[in-house]
Image (tube, helix red, strand yellow):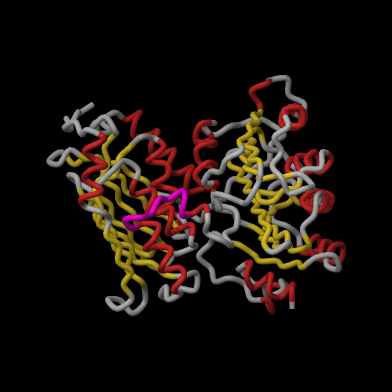
Amino acid sequence: MARVCWPYFDPEYENLSTRINPPRVSVDNSSCSDCTLVKVDSVNKPGILLEVVQVLTDLDLIIAKAYISSDGGWFMDVFHVTDQQGKQITDRKTIDHIEKALGPKGHITEVVKTWPGKRVGVHSVGDHTAIELIGRDRPGLLSEISAVLADLHFNVVAAEVWTHNRRIACVLYVNDTTCQPVDNPTRLSTIEERLKNILRGCEDDDNVGHTSFSMGFTHVDRRLHQMLFADRDYEGRGGGGGLSNEVDFPACFQPKITIERWEEKGYSVVSVRCKDRAKLMFDIVCTLTDMEYVVFHATISSDGPYASQEYYIRHMDGCTLDTEGEKERVVKCIDAAIRRRVSEGLRLELCAKDRVGLLSEVTRILRENGLSVIRAGVSTIGGQGMNVFYVRDSSGNSVDIQKIEALRKEIGHKMMFNVKKISTSSKAPETPETSGWAKTSFFFGNLLERFLA
């Protein structure tokens, strides 16, 4: 393994350098007509690229192109971003937030904590207790977990659930019936034991599932990546009884990841080409950071439905990737990071008045109708509980339209109910007239507006 020697930098000198050379942030709508340019110039520090990308993706912005350079002691980025509709960022509140979060007085965690209206991915949801779960996935598991929480009078304020390679990872924010965090040791011990039993299922192995609690906040997407990475989901797992939740990409969209060595500059060059989607850059940078690799340069671009990303990296100790084993592990981890967030099938959006047991009721109905949850997001805004579920049938196959119609009849009178078909193929999305699906709103804002109208 080649080694590159770096000079020692005193941490206090770094702080002094930051005070002397504060970050400069520019949000430019005049240079390009079809996107907004976000430029960041700052003293370089560990993890700064992930912090910047995290701020942009938490605002649901699409990074169409990016140019990264952080060699030496300076960090210079240019991001070409749009909103979800592909338009420039013109909302003054969003621009002010970007400038404040990334500027001289910005502190990522403090600023994001006070940012209102974010769904899951919000780092703070008021007074809550965070519950982290990871274990072997199976049909109906989320319904069992939410039933236990409801039985103990825990209200799920927000949650995010990912599944990959027959594993499930959840971060749930809960409080009690008085909207206060649950900090009683006895209650926490009870819920921990019951959740462990649920995760264990019929298995005798105590390592099948894990549960943990915290009173603070975390970045949910980042934490889910960390949990599944620590669980080694990238290695793949066999075994019966689990739900096959792997997306079958068309051949043209299969992620292609290669690693080469740039001898002259002492970099390992990681090239990724796959189907473009929101938060793709965040997922890859998050994984490289968690694997303790430093990104010195990067170029990000989109070509129609494809994304091309190239990262020039070294390990934190200055080493490059020279052995086939190291390269194979990085390729597997990036491939897993890309696939964790991809869900093919149906997206169900449900909105109803928030209450203890709402998630339990909804997931029970999904289970009784033979639907398994592949990925889920739960949020509470303005007293309304808004849930998004990506579902397949209990065998991991596409859902039959009759099941959706039966589901609509069962819960349509109780809550707002929308359906959207998600596909990883390059075909144009089906229209309501040809597919039989109702035309749906993609954003929670539209969903809530319709619900309150």
The reply to whether the magenta stretch includes residue 190 is: no
Measured as percent of width and height from the top left, residue 390 is found at: 66, 55
List the single residue furthest toward the left: 264
Measured as percent of width and height from the top left, residue 207 is found at: 64, 23
Q: Is residue 101 left or right of residue 205?
A: left
The residue shown at (41%, 75%) is 88
User: The C terminus is located in which quarter?
Assistant: bottom right
Image-quadrant location for residue 399:
bottom right
Query: Which residue is more in the foreground, 52 or 139?
Result: 52
The reply to whether the magenta stretch includes residue 106 is: yes
63 is higher (above) or lower (below) than 194: below
Q: Is residue 443 left or right of residue 27?
A: right
Measured as percent of width and height from the top left, residue 438 is found at: 72, 73
Query: Which residue is more in the foreground, 346 or 117?
Result: 117
Measured as percent of width and height from the top left, residue 93 is found at: 46, 70
Query: Which residue is more in the foreground, 317 or 75?
Result: 75
Image-quadrant location for residue 447:
bottom right
Query: Which residue is more in the foreground, 117 or 50?
Result: 117
387 is higher (above) or lower (below) than 91: above
Give the magenta range.
Answer: 103-111
Q: Is residue 42 left or right of residue 157?
A: left
384 is higher (above) or lower (below) than 368: below
Is residue 204 among the parts visible in the rendering? yes
Image-quadrant location for residue 328:
top left
